[in-house]
Image (cartoon, helix red, strand yellow):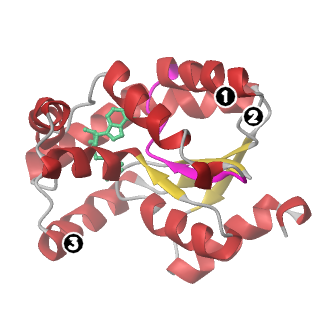
Amino acid sequence: MRLVLLGAPGSGKGTQAARLRDHFGVPHISTGELLRAAVKAGTALGLQAKAVMDAGGLVSDAIVLAILEERLSQGDTSSGYILDGYPRNVAQAHALDVLLGKLGQPVERAIQLDVDTELLVARLAGRALAEHRADDNPESVRKRLQVYEDQTAPVIDYYRHQEKLTSVDGVGAMEEVFERIVEALGSRYA
Ligand code: ADP
C-alpha cells in the first residue's frame, strides 16, 4: 500500500496517518517529523531547515527529497507506507513520481482530507496551546495556510489527473473520519 495523505495544516492528516499505520501495519512517514528530528539532532541540514519551518515556509525541495529518499530506502517500507506532508507542491509530486518510477513502485492512491479554512484556524489555535510547536504561532499559522492554498492545493489536481485522488470529508470525530478513509480505500485494502 503506497498512500499519499493530502490536507491543509490542521486537517488531521498526522492523526489519521498514525491510525492508518496501526490499521494496515505499514510505516507512517511524515516529512514534518523527519525534519523536526533533523532539527532536534542539530544536523547542518536541520539547522538550515529550522528557520524556514518556524516561519511557516517550505523547506527546499532538494533537502526534503534527500531526507525522504533516505527514509524510503529503509527496509520497513517494502510493503508500503503512508506518506504525510509530502508532496507539498507540484514539483515535489513530480519528483516523487520520478523516484518511485525508478523503483517500479508508483503511488497507488492520494487521499485528500477536506476541511473548511475556518475550522483549520480554530484547530491550529487549539494545538498551539496543547503542543507548543514552534510553528503554531498565529503568524506562522497564517503563512502555512497561505502556502497550502498557493502551492499544495494544486497537488490535489495533479493526482486527480492521474485518477488516483479520493476526497474524504475531514470534519467530524477522529474515529468517524478514519472510517470514511478506510471505506474510501475500498475492498482492495480491506
Ligand atoms: P503541518 O501539516 O501542520 O504544516 P508538518 O509537520 O507536516 O505540519 O510540517 C511542518 C513544517 O515542515 C512545514 O510547515 C514545512 O516548513 C516543513 N515541511 C514538511 N514537509 C515538507 C515538504 N514536503 N516540503 C517542504 N517543507 C516541508
Q: Secondary structure at mark 3?
A: helix
Which one is nearer the viewer's eye here, 50 or 68? 68
Residue 56, percent across and down? 19, 39
Could you give the CA–CA distance between mark 1 and mark 2, rounded to whole angstroms?
5 Å
> Would residue 92 be found to the left or right of residue 123 on screen?
right
**Location of residue 110 (image quadrant):** top right
Dot 2 corresponds to which residue? 105
Judge the density around disc 1: few (<14), some (14-19), many (≥20) Cα neighbours within 10 Å: some
The stretch of residues the image draws in magenta is: 79-90
Residue 87 painted magenta: yes
SS of the residue at dot 2? loop
Residue sitting at 27 percent across and 44 percent down?
35
The reply to whether discs 1 and 2 touch (Cβ–Cβ < 8 Å) is yes
Give the left or right position of residue 111, taking residue 50 as reference.
Answer: right
For residue 100, the mark is: 1
Q: Can you give x and y, in whole percent of width and height, for residue 48 in the image?
A: 13, 29
Give the residue at mark 3.
126
- In the displayed structure, 157 sits above or below 176; it is above
Q: Is residue 38 visible to the viewer in this orientation of the structure? A: yes
Q: Quadrant of ligand 1?
A: top left
Kindly indicate the quadrant of the structure image that contains residue 70.
top left
Please give the name of the residue rendered at 66% of the width and 75% of the height, measured from the top-left corner.
23
Instruction: Indicate the amino acid at tag 3.
Output: Gly
